[in-house]
Image: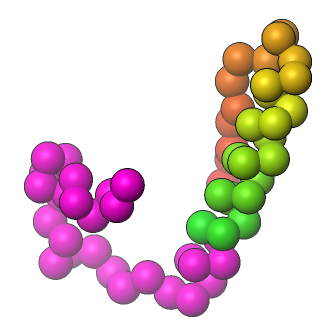
């Protein structure tokens, strides 16, 4: 899913957003991998029902 496609539904004015920096791409990559790996952990443990990421 491309979140930019939902901007209108979310009342986000894309012209007011700043351009994405190179480090943002790396952060997205890192967080995506973090969530993917923790999903495996969560699937194996019935007592885990949430995953929090603090930036």
Q: Quick check: is 14 in the magenta stretch?
A: yes
Q: Residue at x 72, y 66 (%)?
A: 30
Q: Quadrant of residue 5?
A: bottom left
Question: Does residue 7 lie above or below 46 as drawn?
Answer: below
Q: Position of residue 7 (x, y in %)?
A: 20, 57
For the residue pair 21 and 43, the one nearer the viewer reads as 43
Quarter of the N terminus within the rendering: bottom left
Q: Residue at x 73, y 58 (%)?
A: 33
Counting the numbered discs, the total is 0
- Quadrant into which the C terminus falls: bottom right
Foreground: 39 or 21? 39
30 and 17: which is toward the camera: 30
Within the magenta stretch, is there residue 15? yes
With 40 as the anchor, is 23 left or right in this view?
A: left
The magenta span reads: 1-27
User: Relative to 6, does residue 51 appear above or below in the rendering?
Assistant: above
Residue shown at the point (34%, 61%) measured from the top left: 2
Residue under the image location 71 percent in, 47 percent down: 35
Placement of 12 over or under 51, stated as above or below: below
Camera-nearest residue between 10 and 42: 42
* x, y percent for residue 12: 18, 58
Q: Quadrant of residue 19?
A: bottom left
35 relative to 39, above or below: below
Q: Is residue 4 left or right of residue 43?
A: left
What kind of colouring is applied to the model shown? rainbow
Q: Residue lying farthest top?
A: 47
Q: Residue furthest bottom?
A: 22
Percent coordinates x, y for residue 50 in the rendering: 69, 24
């Amino acid at each position: 899913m491309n979140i930019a496609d939902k901007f209108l539904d979310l009342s986000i004015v894309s012209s007011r957003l700043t351009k994405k920096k190179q480090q943002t791409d790396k952060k997205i990559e890192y967080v995506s991998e973090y969530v993917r790996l923790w999903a495996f952990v969560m699937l194996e443990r019935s007592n885990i029902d949430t995953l929090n990421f603090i930036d």
